[in-house]
């Protein structure tokens, strides 16, 4: 595991930063641990509004892991708002929603990638590879 | 000798969870996230899970007893529970959630209530099986640290 962490971070400098947006503490904990394992600096927020607010405060992230169903502001609305604000970060939607039209709506809001929950190391690695490929 | 028996017990308990399909591959994913800096990550996540799931099930129980049942509200809560159950690899719990949701979506009150009770049962079974497992793991962990050269 340590070796793969070095392998990922060696390829890019400076360090990748990520924002986890999820209302569920279990998922936030798991996603943070996945990111920590890859040496990715990360922060967490609990809903879409907090994700927007953290960007309004001037912070920026290379990667945003965005859950779909959240109270106050959901992932679709948050993604839309962030894109309207000019945020060009990689936004990966992560959700347990299975219905095609819901996933489509999420993608159309401005996602760069979509992965079904639960997130695993290989799904996260594929998001990061996509991010590196787009740079 | 004693720690070898303990380790065997742990291996055997763990295997039974997969053989009985109580847990799935997602649990293994969590195990792979443990390292020296985070040796109890799986137990920590499952503790968080059970704290949330127990509270959610209590709220669901009340919602299922209300007349009439607010099915959209119940579905939302079941969706939440499904998300975290899937994230920890709670396979049977997740399956029972799906069954309950289907019956709720068809507004089959009695069926949904029965399915919910099955869901509760699977959840409580999982909790009852994992608690001694983590206890054994911690014991094995302490035994190993005691054996490490100072």
Image: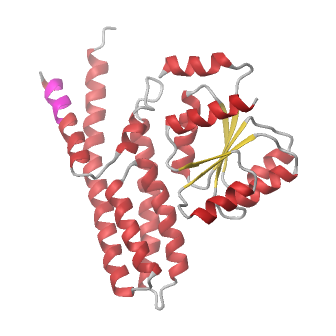
Q: How many marks?
A: 0
| Residue B10 x %, y % | 22, 35
Can residue B44 be seen? yes
Q: Residue at x 43, y 30 (%)?
A: B34
Say which quadrant the N terminus of chain B sits in: top left
Of helix, strand and loop, which mostly describes the magenta segment?
helix
Q: Is A127 one of the magenta-colored residues? A: no
Question: Is A1 or A46 nearer to us in this picture?
Answer: A1
Q: Is B4 one of the magenta-colored residues? A: yes
| Residue B98 x %, y % | 40, 67
Query: Can you name the residue that lies furthest to the bottom here?
Result: B67
Say which quadrant the C terminus of chain B sits in: top left
Query: Can you name the residue that lies furthest to the top here?
Result: B150
| Residue A66 x %, y % | 66, 49
Q: Answer above or below: position of B81 versus A39.
A: below
Q: Residue at x 41, y 55 (%)?
A: B50
| Residue B144 x %, y % | 28, 21
Question: Is A80 or B57 nearer to us in this picture?
Answer: A80
Q: Residue at x 70, y 20 (%)?
A: A12
Q: Residue at x 33, y 82 (%)?
A: B111
Q: Answer above or below: position of A103 versus A88.
A: below
Question: Is A67 or B131 nearer to us in this picture?
Answer: A67
The residues colored magenta run B3-9
Relative horizontal placement of residue A34, taking residue B106 as reference (left or right)? right
Which of the 4 image quadrants contains residue B104? bottom left
Can residue A69 be seen? no
How is this picture coloured?
secondary structure
Q: Answer above or below: position of A69 versus B142.
A: below
Relative horizontal placement of residue A112, taking residue B22 as reference (left or right)? right
């Amino acid at each position: 595991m340590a070796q793969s962490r070095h392998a990922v971070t060696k390829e890019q400098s400076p360090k990748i930063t990520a924002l986890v947006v999820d209302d569920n503490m279990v998922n936030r904990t798991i996603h943070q641990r996945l990111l920590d394992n890859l040496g990715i600096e990360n922060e967490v927020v609990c809903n879409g509004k907090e994700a927007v607010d953290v960007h309004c405060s001037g912070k920026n992230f290379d990667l945003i892991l965005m859950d779909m169903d959240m109270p106050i502001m959901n992932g679709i609305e948050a993604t839309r708002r962030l894109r309207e604000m000019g945020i060009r970060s990689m936004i990966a939607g992560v959700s347990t929603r299975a219905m095609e039209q819901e996933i489509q709506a999420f993608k159309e809001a401005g996602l760069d990638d979509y992965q079904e929950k639960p997130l695993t190391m290989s799904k996260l690695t594929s998001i990061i590879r996509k991010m590196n490929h787009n740079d | 000798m004693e720690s070898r028996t303990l380790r065997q017990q742990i291996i055997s308990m763990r295997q039974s969870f997969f053989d009985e399909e109580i847990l799935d591959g997602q649990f293994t994913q969590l195990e792979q996230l443990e390292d020296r800096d985070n040796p109890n990550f799986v137990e920590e996540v499952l503790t968080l899970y059970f704290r949330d799931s127990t509270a959610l099930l209590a709220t669901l129980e009340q919602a299922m007893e209300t007349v009439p049942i607010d099915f959209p509200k119940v579905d939302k809560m079941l969706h939440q529970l499904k998300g975290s159950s899937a994230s920890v690899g709670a396979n049977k719990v997740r399956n029972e959630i799906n069954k309950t949701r289907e019956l709720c979506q068809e507004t089959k009150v009695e069926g949904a209530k029965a399915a919910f009770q099955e869901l509760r049962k699977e959840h409580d079974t999982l909790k009852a099986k994992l608690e001694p497992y983590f206890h054994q793991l911690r014991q094995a962990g302490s035994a190993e640290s005691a054996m490490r050269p100072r």
